[in-house]
Image (cartoon, rainbow, N blue to C red):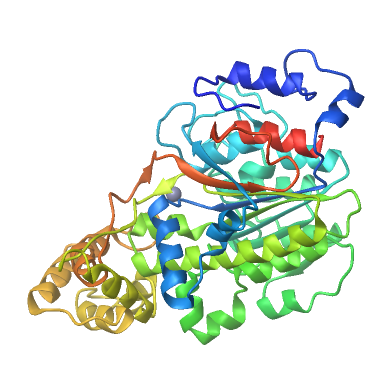
Amino acid sequence: MKSNPKLTRRHFIQGLTLAGITVGVGAKLSASQAIRKVPKAKNLILMVSDGMNNGTLSAANHWMKLTENKESEWMRLYTDSLAKRLLVETTCADSLVTDSAAASSAWGIGHRVNMGSINTMSDGSMPTPLAVLAKQHGKSVGMVSTARITHATPAGFAASVANRNMEDPIAVQYLERALDVLLGGGDKHFNPIARKDKRNLYADYAQAGYRVVTKRSTMQQLKHTKNPILGVFCKDHLPYCIDRTHKESLKQQIPSLEEMTQVALKHLSQNPEGFVLQVEAGRVDHAGHANDPATILFEQLEFDRTIGLVRAFAEKEGDTLVAVTTDHGTGGFMLNGADDGYRNAQKRFLKMGHCKGSFDSIEEQLDPVNKSENIAAVVEKTLSIQLEETERKVLQKALQTDKSQSLYHTSNAMANALHPILFKRFSVNWTSHNHTADLVEMALFGPGSNLLPGYIENWQLHHAFRKALQI
Ligand SMILES: [Zn+2]
């Protein structure tokens, strides 16, 4: 389709219908006409860096150029003229600023839904999500995430529930819908001790033929068979990449996003009918909420390495449509000019390479009774910075009065106190702890990548995927 700034949902659906695909309304051309016109993709891989502002994408590319003298994998999709570049508008049905549930549902069912809904329309109807359609057409389905595998973004690919918080039922739906590979966090939604209904989902998955793994080493030793895989590696979200890198026990227990994706690709590619796979770097979003600069950078870099892995697979296979994108921005992370005519920005930016842990790891090291007691020493050690006396006092004061925790573990009081301190050290800044409404980036390559114009609304992707996969 040609780019059209006034493209409406009706026009878009008409366009796809004329090209041979039924998207729920209107007449369609014959199947033979459709097949002639549509470049068929056997496989689909949707890669999501959840909550990624363009500042995060830019920082990862700067980092790669400064430290490894090459562009990020994402940018190399463009410099090698492999991928088409798109800008995506991420609004949901009831808000300009979306959440992950509504954004993922737009990809899942091709409609905008209200905030918090998983593939459920405001009238309560539940159109069939993409992963289920793929199963109905004989394809395998996989999901890999560094967040809980029942969290909003994976759920939007394969589940249908009224509210994203229904993660216990989502874990059951994945089993009922016979998904082939599930790798991520979220033990509390599978474990009978933590589930509200006390159901042992691990036993139920095993009974259904799944190989169930809970450790990195066990996942890596999995024999190559056709049995589906459930891998759940910790109670909640997986620990941040920066913490896994610097803590041996976490390294042993928790696989990286790349390792999980490798296992998923190996398993799913056994199906001659093809597969659809969602790969989510779910914790880019959480580091954005926490305004934790080194953590978001290293989460994004891990996602970027995984792009390289997926690209190598897709180039070898040749019939794989790959979309690399985000669902929305979070936090507004940005490298800013620093003094000496901005020249100090680079030097400061590179100092993040000395950070040894996330804000979560700082919280874990604080005195459990009096959090402010050792805050300064822990911050200095973890972030490899030297605090001034006034800064120590500001931090201590923030923690003395802080009783709360934010949505994603780290207290906003600590993050807010660290905000100006880290701006001075690393030259990075934030707009808020919230999601943002900026247009987001997408790289699209493989058969079907020419189906969309250069500017789209997120729900349009669903229809292009179906058209390319012919499902
Ligand atoms: Zn978020």
Residue depicted at x 29% and y 82%:
384
Q: Closer to the camera, 205 or 115?
A: 115
Eyeballing the image, is 45 above or below 28?
A: below
Question: Quarter of the image containing the C terminus?
Answer: top right
Q: Position of residue 397 (x, y in %)?
A: 13, 68
Query: Is any part of residue 458 visible from this angle?
Result: yes
205 horizontally vs 458: left or right: right
Task: Return the residue nearer the eye: 299 or 189.
Answer: 299
Residue 451 found in image quarter? top right
Q: Can residue 408 be seen in this view?
A: no
Locate residue 70 relative to residue 214 in the image: left or right. left
Instruction: Please determine whether, in this image, residue 220 is positioned above or below residue 290.
Output: below
Residue 74 coordinates in the image, percent (x, y):
55, 58
Task: Name the residue at the left extreme.
Answer: 390
Q: Position of residue 261 (x, y in %)?
A: 68, 64
Q: Nearer the viewer, residue 178 or 466?
A: 466
Quadrant into which the N terminus falls: top right
Q: Which of 154 and 336 is in front in this view?
A: 336
> Which quarter of the figure has residue 311?
bottom right
* Position in image of residue 422 (x %, y %): 24, 68
Q: Which residue is drawn at 48% across and 63% down?
A: 300
- Image quadrant in which you'd find residue 463: top right
Q: Is residue 330 above or below residue 464?
A: below
- Left or right, 294 with respect to 46, comes to left
Residue lying at the far top in this picture: please name it.
26
